[in-house]
Amino acid sequence: MIRSLKRYARYFFLTTFARKERHLLFRDIKVYFLSQQWKKKPFNKTEKVKSLHAAANWLLNNQSYNKDGGFSTYYIVEGHTSSYPETSGYIIDSLFSYSKKFSRQEILPQLYRCADWLISIQKASGGWQGGYIAENKAEIVFNTGQVMRGLLKAYQESKSEKYLNSCIQAGDWLCQIQENDGSWKKFALMNSERVYESYVSTVLLDLWKYTGKEKFKNAAILNLNRIVENKISANGWLMDCDNTIRHNDRPILHTIAYAIDGIIDCGLQLNEKKYIDGVKKTADVLLMKFTNKHWLGGRFSNCWEESEAFICTGGAQMSIVWMKLYKIYQDKKYLTAAVMMNNWLCWIQSATTGLGKAVEGGLQGSFPIYGRYEPFAFPNWATKYLLDSLMMEFELNA
């Protein structure tokens, strides 16, 4: 507790007096305590496309800070981190899509450079490490799945077998270490079962479609059945969903959204509505909370009581979830909530204009920026999901 207070005091002091990004802190304090203007700020299609390109350009610029081709996180006080293999994988997945949608072929070499780097750091087991590359951690199930996303997209775009072969090695490892009940515990974060591994099952289904190997499909189904049949409460709350042990009774919006999105995507790939129905209630509870207050907390107890500041990444992920449900059910409430969420995120992002390449176009970890999740920081995955959510809205409203 004392260490945390010292860290926050340092962050507040340096951001206020020694950094140009103090504008973000002052803006957030002002509007959070004195105004609710973000709740009413609309963004038209032209403005959102501008925000979309700003997010993509922030990611592309971010890649230049490390020599290996990976993507870092920017902390206002400490600066850029080393590259993050997990998020680098699913960032290039998004940027490949962005390149195709907006005819940005000139960015492809740097995306393949990242993909080649990811292959070069694959562990002998087939997995990829947790955390930032400088931490040199052991391989982790979730991180491995997200690297596979990028490599499968690189294979889809290039047809180069090296990317697919790398993913097959990783998929073999994931199947080998899976528990008989469908969960992952060995090499899982904290060596504990987590329902957001559904986001890994989606990738295994992708790999099954590319290879025809049934074991990848079977592993995904085993995991999905475990989650839907045992881990979803009657009120839609998800058990074993936080990325910590200490706060597992109040998971964060970010990991809740991972779990929902993974299950929906698997249901779509398998044409199994029972999976989608299993988490629709979870998405609906969060939708109701957001549309009633134009706000979402960062954590949720098992009775859906909110705590902590808004987590921007989770908001963008929920926007994606709601748009997927809109496409499935054609219920306008989902699209309305997604558009409203994207308006809020674009408003948060808009404060970065003119603050320099390290910040401009990026999305902060929390709102206000001093929230508990990634405080005073621009995690690369927040901007990745903002890009995804805006591209999806662009498609639906084209």
Image: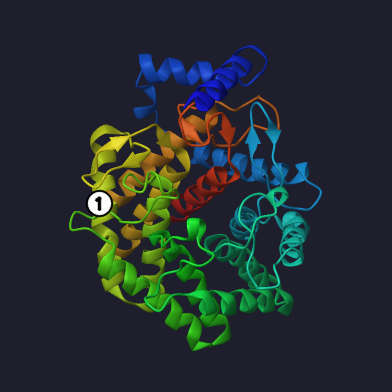
- Residue type of the residue flagged with mark 1: Asp
The correct choice, above or below, for 170 with respect to 26 in the image is below
Q: Which residue is drawn at the image coordinates 45% and 68% (left, top)?
A: 184
Residue 348 at x, y percent in the picture? 49, 30
Circle 1: element type: helix
Above or below residue 333? Residue 51 is above
Q: Nearer the viewer, residue 369 or 331?
A: 369
Q: Mark 1 points at which residue?
A: 284
Left or right of residue 221: residue 62: right
Looking at the rendered structure, the number of numbered marks drawn on it comes to 1
Q: Is residue 364 above or below residue 99?
A: above
**Visual colour scheme:** rainbow
Of residue 256 and residue 21, the one placed in the foreground of this image is: 256
- Outermost residue toward the top? 17
Q: Of all residues shown, which one is farthest toward the right?
A: 67
Whether residue 194 sits left or right of residue 304 in the image: it is right
Residue at 47 percent across and 49 percent down: it is 389
> For the point 33% across and 67% down, which residue is it?
227
Camera sees residue 329: no
The foreground one among 33 and 1 is 1
- Asked whether, in this view, residue 356 is left or right of residue 327, the answer is right
Considering every residue shown, the one lying at the far front of the view is 2
Does residue 53 appear anywhere in the picture? yes
Mark 1 Cα within 10 Å, few/some/many (few <14, many 20+)?
some
In this rendered view, identify the residue nearer to me: 305 or 338: 305
Percent position (x, y) of residue 240?
35, 56
> Which of the 4 image quadrants contains residue 36?
top left
Report which quarter residue 380 is drawn in. Answer: top right
Q: Position of residue 363 (x, y in %)?
A: 55, 37
